Image: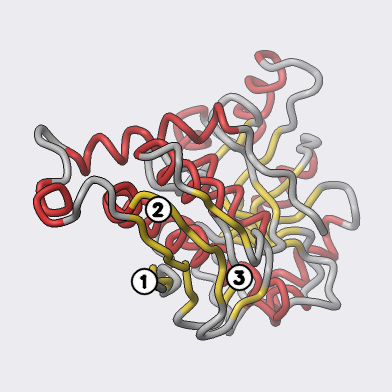
């Protein structure tokens, strides 16, 4: 499946901010003092381990914001499977610009490729079941749009983007509102008819209460496979079912086998390991 790239206007500001943070008050004093202004370089972005590419547009923007004359030639685009030694892109042009933009470009590319790679691993693990792998609002501040993009590149899907595009009534909301029925009633009175309402439940009794008031989706929190299967049976298609809580690549297949519609995994974005990618000098 081809994933539509993010519009440059959405990602250029975050790349610019990262470069400004790195350049500080005096710019790249190392490169500027060592590399002649006229020097040119031939380099390549190369994978050090197996995974899935994501974030090439951010890498390209990082180099071109520093030096517009840098030529960025993609060899393996976002979503491509890669292995150790595979060339992802060629980067050619003024050497100073390449060296100055290198770290920011690699930071984005490695981080997002790590998310895409792990997502692909879990998506493959649950293949054959109906469950989709989704990510949540547990993103690194300022990077939500690109982290959620990386999940899509890996074959996953996205949960809500923010507090404003869906209602998710969690345990603290229920406690303050005085119960599930009161919380759902308040939400329905406040939001528009196109806004879906989801309720987090910890027990089958709470699930039955949520179903009685007609919620659109239920978040089945920290339930094991057997309890999830029973929950799916109780729901019987009346709401979207979402499993959440401590799910790993190892436990995901059993969770998916319970019949849930969604498996949400927050750590995919907030604490995933970066994919090892380097910039190699080629002459």
Q: Is residue 231 above or below residue 57?
A: below
Q: Residues within 10 Å of mark 2 (few under 14, many from 20)?
A: many
Q: Earlier in the sequence, mark 2 or mark 3?
A: 3
Secondary structure beneath label 3? strand
The percent coordinates of residue 71 (x first, y second) are 51, 49
Residues marked 1 and 3 touching at CB (< 8 Å): no
Marking on residue 210: none
Marking on residue 52: 3
Residue in the picture at 44% in, 37% down: 68
Give the quadrant of the C terminus: bottom left
- Decide which of 252, 81 is in the foreground and name it: 81
- Report whether residue 169 is seen: yes
Secondary structure beneath label 1? strand
**Residue mark closest to the camera, 1 vs 3:** 1
Residue in the picture at 70% in, 78% down: 226
Marking on residue 105: 2
For disc 1, the marked residue is 281
Q: Is residue 54 above or below residue 147?
A: below
């Amino acid at each position: 499946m081809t994933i539509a790239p993010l519009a440059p206007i959405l990602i250029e500001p975050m790349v610019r901010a990262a470069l400004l943070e790195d350049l500080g008050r005096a710019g790249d004093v190392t490169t500027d003092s060592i590399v002649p202004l006229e020097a040119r370089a031939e380099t390549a972005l190369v994978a050090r381990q197996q995974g899935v590419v994501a974030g090439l547009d951010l890498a390209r923007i990082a180099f071109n914001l520093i030096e517009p004359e840098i030529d960025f030639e993609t060899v393996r685009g976002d979503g491509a499977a890669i292995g150790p030694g595979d060339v992802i892109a060629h980067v050619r042009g003024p050497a100073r610009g390449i060296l100055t933009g290198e770290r920011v470009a690699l930071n984005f590319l490695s981080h997002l490729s790590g998310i895409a790679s792990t997502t692909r691993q879990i998506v493959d693990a649950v293949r054959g079941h109906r469950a989709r792998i989704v990510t949540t609002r547990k993103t690194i501040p300022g990077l939500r749009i690109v982290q959620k993009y990386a999940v899509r590149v890996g074959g996953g899907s996205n949960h809500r983007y923010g507090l404003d595009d869906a209602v998710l009534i969690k345990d603290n909301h229920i406690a303050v509102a005085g119960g599930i029925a009161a919380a759902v009633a308040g939400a329905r009175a406040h939001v528009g008819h196109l806004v879906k309402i989801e309720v987090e439940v910890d027990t089958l009794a709470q699930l039955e209460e949520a179903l009685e008031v007609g919620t659109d989706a239920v978040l089945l929190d920290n339930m094991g496979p057997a309890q999830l299967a029973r929950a799916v049976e109780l729901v019987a298609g009346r709401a979207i079912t979402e499993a959440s809580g401590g799910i790993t690549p190892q436990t995901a297949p059993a969770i998916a086998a319970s019949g849930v519609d969604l498996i949400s995994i927050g750590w995919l974005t907030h604490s995933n390991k970066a994919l090892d990618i380097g910039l190699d000098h080629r002459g």
